[in-house]
Image (cartoon, rainbow, N blue to C red):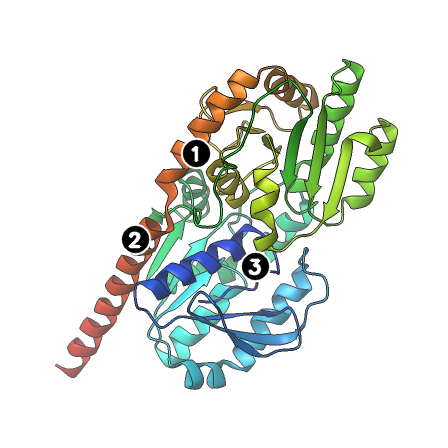
């Protein structure tokens, strides 16, 4: 499995890789993850039963990724490809994100004849609009590489139906499947002692502080709550990124420092008790593929407040397990949060609905779907070898 991101580096894409690796290992597969270096070690045996090989220079900032770093990772993988292939002897590669991981899959397919599967997860798909012009430029410059990666892949999957539509808008000739993200209920589960009251309500936002995730919209919504005299809440913000300064400037503008608890970046293992201490999860994203943190919040029994955009439609049912507002509509988010703050009964109802809906996204089911893709790709490779012998 190949992904630049892997905990503690990055966000949902790395989390997906970790849990696919964990549950593939449980199925008896010999799994090695090749990823970027978060520290001085070159390889470890992960406690979940798979190996990790680290490549490239150590990454100092774990929460954010820049395009030059992605390019460096791709080139480093290709430079060390002979040693990687000789050491791991992979039968198949699973590339998370078209770029940069897919470039390694393409190279290994051409040079070593190793088939590969591509998981598209959101921002790696041209046309996935997160409101950042730099990503648009990046996609324009690299779209010929992305097409080549897709043309040579044994399978391409999206993590949601809406992302599949975006994939087909970019290149409609491929059969794009859908295999969703999942959630590990061994880690993420509700607080058994949860109470629902009118006392201080704990709000939670977990994400990188980047334009896509809408932390500015959330702070503006909190400012509106203050204007309305809604004060019985605290907001915990988990994450770091280049919008941190803007976030704090907005917090000061609305004079709500006493309402905000920013605890910075946290490792995946630190998150479960944070979810269990919360009452409402909020994510005002501009766009999503399928949000891993939202699935984790659902499995933790939290009602969800999210943007009315594609990417949430597969996991969020309006007035079922959550409420929605138009992205960048701070007043709409303030309305939704205020409604939940003022109604413990609604929070309890939506919490139960979130927990029930999260059961549809078990990693056991999802990894078996991926295993089917692996077997199909390897069967096709064997058939091609047999045809060549004839």
Report the disc number at residue 142: 3
Identify the residue shown where x is 47% and y is 26%: 321
Q: Looking at the image, is 26 positioned above or below residue 282?
A: below
261 left or right of 171 in image: right
- In the image: residue 64, left or right of residue 276: right
Answer yes or no: is residue 175 visible: no
Question: Disc 3 vs disc 1: Cβ atoms closer than 8 Å?
Answer: no
Q: CA distance from mark 1 to mark 2?
A: 23 Å
> In whole angstroms, how far apart are the C-alphas of marks 3 and 1?
40 Å
Tag 2 and tag 3, C-beta contact below 8 Å: no
Vertical relation: 207 (above or below) 64: above
Dot 2, how many residues are within 10 Å of its Cα: few (below 14), some (14-19), or many (20+)?
Answer: some
> How many residues crowd around disc 1 within 10 Å: few (fewer than 14), some, or many (20 or more)?
many
SS at mark 1 in the image: helix
| Badge nearest the viewer, 2 or 3 | 2
The residue indicated by pointer 1 is 355
């Amino acid at each position: 499995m190949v992904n630049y991101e892997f905990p503690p580096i990055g966000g949902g894409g790395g989390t997906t890789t970790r849990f696919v690796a964990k549950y593939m290992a449980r199925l008896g597969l010999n799994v090695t993850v090749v990823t970027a270096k978060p520290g001085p070690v070159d390889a470890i045996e992960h406690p979940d039963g798979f190996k990790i090989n680290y490549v490239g220079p150590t990454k100092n900032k774990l929460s954010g990724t820049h395009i030059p770093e992605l390019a460096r990772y791709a080139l480093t993988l290709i430079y060390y490809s002979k040693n990687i292939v000789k050491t791991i002897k992979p039968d198949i590669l699973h590339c998370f994100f078209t770029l940069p991981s897919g470039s390694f899959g393409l190279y290994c397919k051409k040079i070593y004849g190793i088939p590969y599967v591509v998981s598209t997860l959101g921002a790696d798909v041209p046309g996935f609009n997160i409101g950042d012009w730099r990503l648009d430029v990046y996609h324009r410059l690299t779209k010929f590489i992305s097409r080549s990666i897709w043309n040579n892949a044994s399978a391409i999957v999206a993590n949601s139906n809406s992302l599949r539509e975006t994939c087909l808008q970019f290149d409609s000739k491929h059969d794009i499947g859908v295999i969703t993200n999942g959630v590990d209920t061994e880690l993420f589960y509700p607080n058994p002692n949860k109470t629902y009251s009118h006392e201080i309500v704990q709000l939670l936002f977990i994400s990188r502080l980047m334009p896509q995730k809408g932390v500015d919209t959330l702070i503006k919504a909190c400012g509106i709550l203050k204007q309305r005299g809604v004060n019985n809440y605290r907001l915990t913000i988990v994450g770091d990124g280049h919008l941190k300064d803007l976030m704090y400037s907005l917090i000061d503008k609305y004079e709500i420092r006493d309402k905000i608890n920013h605890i910075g970046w946290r490792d995946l293992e630190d998150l479960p008790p944070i979810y269990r201490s919360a009452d409402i999860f909020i994510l005002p994203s501009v766009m999503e593929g399928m949000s891993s943190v939202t699935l984790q919040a659902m499995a933790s029994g939290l009602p969800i407040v999210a943007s009315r955009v594609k990417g949430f439609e597969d996991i969020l049912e309006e007035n079922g397990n959550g409420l929605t507002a138009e992205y960048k509509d701070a007043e709409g988010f303030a309305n939704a949060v205020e409604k939940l703050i003022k109604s413990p009964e609604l929070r309890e109802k939506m919490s139960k609905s979130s927990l029930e809906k999260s059961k549809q996204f078990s990693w056991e089911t999802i990894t078996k779907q991926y295993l089917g893709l692996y077997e199909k790709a390897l069967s096709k490779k064997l058939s091609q070898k047999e045809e060549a012998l004839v």
